[in-house]
Every structure is written in structure tokens, then in C-alpha cells.
Image: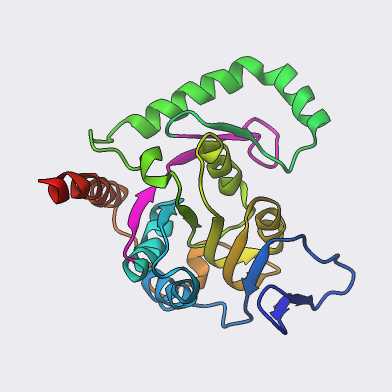
């Protein structure tokens, strides 16, 4: 494992001295077994850590994928807070090794920080029309099949500590898209929780997040599924319908309380 937690919370000692220490974000990265029985098990392990600090505080959990929802539901249950989901799609171009950009279900758009501003300017100059076409197609794809309830509401995040949850982060790009979505919302802390992350993703987390809960940092990240014995993710439609119902029920609670 490339990172080990030492000393008080928020101090991490690198096992590779050539890598510089990270920034000011409070981080809790542990050298645990990088393999998990299931996403539910990993979510319970994360929840046990998060609830120690955030129980009784206004929080909202945002799953960044179907797998992120499976992890996030355990955190939401422990905190007794709302569980939402932010859909996003990457925009890939011919001959480019990584996605150039990403877009969320409501149109929040972010270029990939892996590219320099100069590289982005050059690529956009060459592929502007294709990027715009991809944006429209990705938006249509995400909106197709969504019900009327919605997967996420900005008013449910307002004034809350927002916990972005993934089942594994290969590069942290989904965090950039989420951060773009959250820009116009006044939130408390931005917290990232994930059982697994690559070193590249941890770098990105420290730029974007106020606090990080990460159980295992992996130097040679393979695929997220590789680190789980059981593939316990329902179909995408099932995940979407379940989260829509949670969001709908959560919105109804204040009205019922006033009745």
C-alpha cells in the first residue's frame, strides 16, 4: 500500500518519500485489506468512521454511480440522512487517452484536470463541434428513463455537509463533475468517501475536498469490480428507481410534519 495513516487524524505519512505531502484537506486513509466482500460491507466500514464525527449534523449523501449508491446507502442509514445520486457521463474523443470532459444530468460541465489549459484549448479548437454533439447525446442518454421524482435536488443539499460517495475512484474525474454541480449551492463541508482510490484520485481529492474517508489507496489500480468478491450492484434501472423514491419520500417529510 502506498499510504499509511500515522499519528493524529489528518496526518498521513507517505511510504514513497519522493512524493510530496498533500494539501490542507483532513484525510483518513487507512492501510486495510484492499479487497472487500461486497460494496455493502465496505459502506458499513466507512459509515462506522464517518458517524463518529458527523452523527447528528445536517448531512446529505450523493452517490456518484450505481456502485457509489450501494456504498452510500450504508452511510445514509448510519447518519439518518437523505441519499441522492448524481449521474454523469464522460466525453471521449478519438486518439485521446482520457476523457476530455464530463457532464452531469443537469448539464454541469467540467473539463478533465488531467489535461493542461493549453492542451484543452488545442483539443477544443479541433473538436468543438464533436464535443457539443457529445454533450447533447450524453444529456439525452442520462435523462432517458428518469422518472419525474428526480435523483437529486439542490435544496436537499443546501446548508448540509455533502458526502460524495464512490465504490472506487480510478482518477477522481467524477469528483470534478460533482464539484461543478455543487458550485452554485451553499453547502457545509465537502466530504469524499470511498473504499478504494488510486494515487491519482487521492491527489484530486485533496484539491477538491474538505475531508476524505478512504479505506485503501492503491498504487496499481486495476478495475473497481476487481476489489469486490461479490458484485452486489442491482440493475441501473433498479438503482435509479430506488433513489428517486428516497428523494421523493424525503421531500414529503416536512409537509407531513406540518400537517
Identify the residue at the far right of this view.
18
Q: Name which quarter of the figure residue 106 lies in.
A: top left
Which residue: 52% across, 31% down?
Answer: 108
Which residue: 56% across, 47% down?
Answer: 174
Identify the residue at the far left of this view.
259
Residue 129 picture location, percent across and down: 61, 15
Left-right relation of 195 to 44: right
Q: Name which quarter of the figure residue 213 lies in.
A: bottom right
Residue 27 picture location, percent across and down: 65, 68
Left-right relation of 48 to 109: left
Query: In the rendered structure, which segment of residues is drawn in magenta?
Result: 80-104
Question: In the rendered view of the protein, which quadrant contains the N terminus?
Answer: bottom right
Q: Is residue 228 above or below residue 258?
A: below
Which residue: 42% across, 34% down?
Answer: 105
Residue 212 picture location, percent across and down: 60, 64
Q: Nearer the viewer, residue 80 or 132?
A: 80
Tally of marks: 0
Identify the residue at the far front of this view.
258
Q: Nearer the viewer, residue 110 or 189?
A: 189
Q: Is residue 85 on the magenta stretch?
A: yes
Q: Is residue 233 on the magenta stretch?
A: no
Q: Nearer the viewer, residue 160 or 195?
A: 160
Q: How is the image coloured?
A: rainbow
Q: Is residue 77 above or below residue 238?
A: below
Q: Nearer the viewer, residue 69 or 119?
A: 69
Amino acid at each position: 500500500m502506498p499510504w499509511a495513516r500515522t499519528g493524529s487524524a489528518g496526518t498521513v505519512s507517505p511510504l514513497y518519500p519522493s512524493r510530496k505531502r498533500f494539501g490542507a484537506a483532513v484525510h483518513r486513509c487507512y492501510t486495510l485489506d484492499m479487497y472487500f466482500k461486497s460494496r455493502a460491507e465496505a459502506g458499513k466500514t466507512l459509515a462506522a468512521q464517518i458517524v463518529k464525527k458527523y452523527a447528528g449534523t445536517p448531512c446529505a449523501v450523493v452517490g456518484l454511480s450505481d456502485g457509489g449508491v450501494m456504498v452510500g446507502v450504508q452511510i445514509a442509514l448510519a447518519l439518518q440522512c437523505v441519499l441522492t445520486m448524481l449521474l454523469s457521463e464522460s466525453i471521449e474523443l478519438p486518439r485521446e487517452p482520457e476523457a476530455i470532459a464530463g457532464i452531469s444530468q443537469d448539464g454541469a460541465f467540467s473539463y478533465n484536470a488531467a489535461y493542461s489549459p493549453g492542451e484543452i484549448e488545442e483539443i477544443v479548437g479541433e473538436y468543438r463541434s464533436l464535443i457539443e454533439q457529445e454533450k447533447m447525446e450524453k444529456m439525452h442518454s442520462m435523462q432517458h428513463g428518469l422518472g419525474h421524482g428526480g435523483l437529486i435536488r439542490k435544496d436537499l443539499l443546501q446548508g448540509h455537509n455533502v458526502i460524495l460517495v464512490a465504490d472506487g475512484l480510478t482518477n477522481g474525474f467524477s469528483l470534478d463533475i460533482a464539484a461543478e454541480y455543487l458550485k452554485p449551492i451553499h453547502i457545509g463541508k465537502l466530504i469524499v468517501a470511498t473504499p478504494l482510490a488510486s494515487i491519482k484520485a487521492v491527489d484530486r481529492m485533496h484539491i477538491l475536498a474538505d475531508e476524505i474517508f478512504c479505506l485503501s489507496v492503491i498504487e496499481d489500480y486495476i478495475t473497481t469490480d476487481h476489489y469486490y468478491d461479490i458484485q452486489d450492484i442491482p440493475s441501473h434501472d433498479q438503482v435509479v428507481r430506488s433513489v428517486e423514491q428516497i428523494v421523493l419520500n424525503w421531500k414529503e417529510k416536512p409537509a407531513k410534519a406540518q400537517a
